[in-house]
Every structure is written in structure tokens, then in C-alpha cells.
Image (cartoon, rainbow, N blue to C red):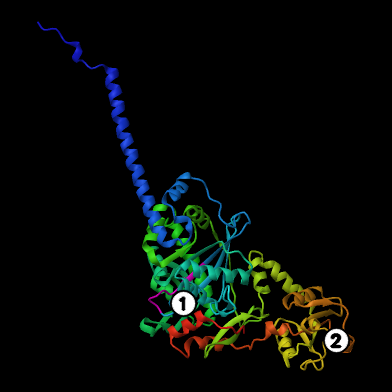
Amino acid sequence: MFAINNNFRENPPRRRKRRFFFWLVIGIIILGLAFLASVAVAYKFYSTSKKVITTDATDSFLGSLRDMASGDRKTLRGEKDGRINILLLGFAGENYPGENLTDSIIIASVDPRTYQTAMLSVPRDLYVRIPDTASYTKINALYARGQGKRGSAAEGIDDLKKALVEITGLPIHYSVAIDFDGFKKVIDELGGIKVQVPRDIHDERYPGPNYSYETFDIKEGLYTLDGDIALKYARTRHDEAGDFGRAFRQQLILEAARSKAFSIGTLLNVLAVNNVLNTLGDHLRTDIPLDEIETFLDLVGKIDTHTTVNKVLDAGHPDSLMVVSHVYLGHVRAFILIPRTGKYDEIQELAKDIFNLDLIERKKKEIESEKATVAVANRSGSTNFGKKLSALLEKMGYSVQTVPRAEKTIAPPLTSDAGSSKSFVYDISKTKPFSLEDLAKKFSAEVSENLPADLSAQCQKADLCFIAGSKLTENLGYEEDTLEDLEQGYDKQAVGEREYIELLKKGTNQRF
């Protein structure tokens, strides 16, 4: 009879220990594979973002991976000040007429405490100084000029930012630029967007392929627009509001696209964002750093679209802050938009108080209720300038009395050259404080109570007496044209598209 050899019987504790090590190894392998997969996803996201993000934040993959893995919430630029300003740009792209001229320029501002948003559209025909030069051009040429001159989208965006800081007084914290093909891809990826079209549009001169024209027609109603139709709806100019109606439609489309993207989860995680970036590829540029994207998307996802403020800088209405004029780019007459006062103060006030438009409206009503009469005397050295200033003041709602001889150059109130260059506003009735402040601010006039003796008789029946100095002609020296001139300028260019683009990029030394 054989005895059992206990040396071959495995100890239960040893068996449990081996199972533990077995599953530990399996767990380590699984975790390792998961980590490698995460790194692969992160690297794919990093590689894709390198094509899109124009800042230095993507220079180091390990640095970006560390920042993404930390889980720390990044503070966005402007967040501590209670306002984040994002520049949104739309441009045609190399495959379209217009190429890299910016077709859409919108400053979107977000209050990170209330998630209220405001959108201010800047017209593409706004005439601006080219940053770091003494030349001027339309604002829509700055991106193309910077990109073409220095070969970088970042340079073009930087030039636009500098100009917009000067125009609006706002810091521009971030920017996003997308071309037409990218725009269509985004809308199609979303499965289309719902847009309420408020009125019929019939455009027989919508830009078609190979510099041709085609007809775009859409009736009033609720539509789900695909990428192609959404682009046409955003670009068409031939409705009753002209180019300014186009700017408003672009804002509506942006709101619809944002709402759709977050409602279906398109931008709620890194994988989804990576798919979007991968789809857009060469069609999108932004300077949002990689490690701030998650925080940025979280902010955008919380935006309250029901309280969005929509404003467009326009011309042609009594309250419009812009007027139509023209300059010559080479031998080509180009119609432009400029501030009606020749400077940016009114635009800056609107931009600053866009979340509190009631404040601007209250000031306006106070001025209207005063019903101030203004006597205008021309001491600018420019014949007929008094008539021009009077017409502008009447458009702004003032009742104007022209001082005798105001259309001629008369002696300045002071003997020095500085005296004749300044403008003065004299408080005659001392009962119109809001109107007095308004004129002094908008026309850079010095407030005074000591009316020159030679004008006391002519101004005594007015509430305020405005004496125009020569420096004011620098701001108001433009020749005013009509909205019809501006619209016809698009359809009847004297030169070909490419030549016109080059003229815009070159600019001119003519201020107005």
C-alpha cells in the first residue's frame, strides 16, 4: 500500500498568492494598455490641434499631456475681469473669390458669472489704419495682408486684433477663424441647424463658381439648413437690410450652431472635439491654448442664448454710428464705412456697455428730452464746413441754428494757432447738461462759459454755441455717400477680383 506524498500537495495560501500575482499582472497589463491608449488618443488630439492652434502652447507634447492630465481647471483670459472677448472670423479660402478677405468679423463677449453673451458685428468695409504703418485699408483685408506678407495665419489675426482693440477699446482674449469649406463641414457634421428665416430673400447675384453668379431664393419660415444653404443664407447681401442684414444673419447662424453642437454632445469631450478638429483640418485656426480648450468649451456650453445681445455697426439710420464714404485705392474708387464723428468714441461706448444697453438708451433719452438748440460757427478755415457739421448734428437729433457767416472762415476766438485748431462748446442757457457733455465728448470740444464777444449776439438765442476749429476737419473731412453707392460698389468693381484684393492689401495713405 502506497503512502500519499504530501510534498506534491499545494498549500492553499500559496495558491491564493499565485492567483493574486496573476491578476495583478493582468491588471497592470490592462492599465498599461489603457494608459497607452490614452496617450495615443492624447497624441492624436495633440497632433490634430497642432494644425489648428496658432499659439506656442502646442510646442511640447509632454508638457501638453501633463497639463491635460493634471485635472486643474484653467482660468481663462478675461475671466477675472468678468468679461471674455472672442474674435470670430469667417473668410472664403483659397478656392473662392475673395480668398482670405474676412467676410465676417464678430466680437463675441461672454460674462463668465452670468453666462450672458453679446455679439457685435464689425462691417467688413470699415476703413482702418493698418497696424504699425501709416497706411489705411478696409478691415477685411488685414487678415489676408498679414497672412500673405508673413506667411502665417497668426500674423493676420494679430493685425486684426490690434485694429479692433483700437476701434472698440476692448481687449481681444481669443480668436477663432474658419473658411467657407470648414463652415459647411461643421453644419453638415451637426446634421444641419434650425433657423427661423424672418423674411423672404431673392438674390440673383449670389457668387457662384468660377466668378459667376447664381440665384439664391429662400422664403420666410423655419428651416433645417445644411452646410451649403446655411453658407448662402449667411453670405447673401441682396435683402432689404443689405450688408448689415447679412451680419445679423451670421449671428443667428452662430447661435443655432452652438446650441445644436452642445445639445447632441458634439463638443462635450476630448474625443468629440478631436473628431471635429480632424474633420476641419486646414479650414480652422484658433489661438485658444490646448490646455484651456476644456475650460473654454465648458464656458461656451453654459451660454444663455435667451439673453444674447445682438448688435451690428451699421449706416443709413438716424441712430447709425457709421456713414458711407469713399477713398481711392490706386485708381479704383472704393466705398468705405467710417465712424460718423470721425473717431471711435461712440463705438467704444457701445462695446463697453453692450451688456447694459439701457444705460446708453437712458443717456439718449435725456439728450432728447432736453431739446437743446445749437448755434454752429465755422472757424475751421474750411469753407462750408459749418454746413456739414450742422447737417451731422441734425442727424443726431439736435436743432441747429447757423450763425451768420458760419459758412465762411471767420477769425478764431484766440490769437494763437492752437486756439483756431481747437473746437469749443459754450454753455449759454446752462440748462442742457447732457447735451453739453455729449457734444464735448463726441467732437473733442473744450467746454467754456466765456463766449467770444463777437458771437454773443448771434448765439444768445441758442442753448449751446459750438465753434468748429480746424482740427475737427481732420475727423469730419470725409465726403458722404449713400448706402446705394456702397451696395453698387460690390457689383460694379472697376478691376478684377484678384487685382482688387491686392489693392486692398496694399492700402493707401489717404485717411478719408
Q: Nearer the viewer, residue 294 or 226?
A: 294
Crowding at dot 2, Cα within 10 Å, few <14 / some 14-19 / many 20+, comes out as many
In terms of secondary structure, where does tag 2 sit? helix
Q: Is residue 218 magenta?
A: no
In terms of secondary structure, where does tag 1 sit? helix
Q: Which residue is mark 1?
A: 235
Residue sitting at x 31%, y 37%: 29
Residue 208, picture quadrant = bottom left
Q: Quadrant of the C terminus?
A: bottom right
Q: Is residue 89 magenta?
A: yes
Crowding at dot 1, Cα within 10 Å, few <14 / some 14-19 / many 20+, comes out as many
Percent coordinates x, y for residue 143 in the rendering: 50, 73
| The magenta segment | 88-96
Observer able to see residue 401: yes
Residue 8 appears left or right of 491:
left
Q: Which residue is mark 2?
A: 459
Observer able to see residue 353: no
Q: Quadrant of the N terminus?
A: top left
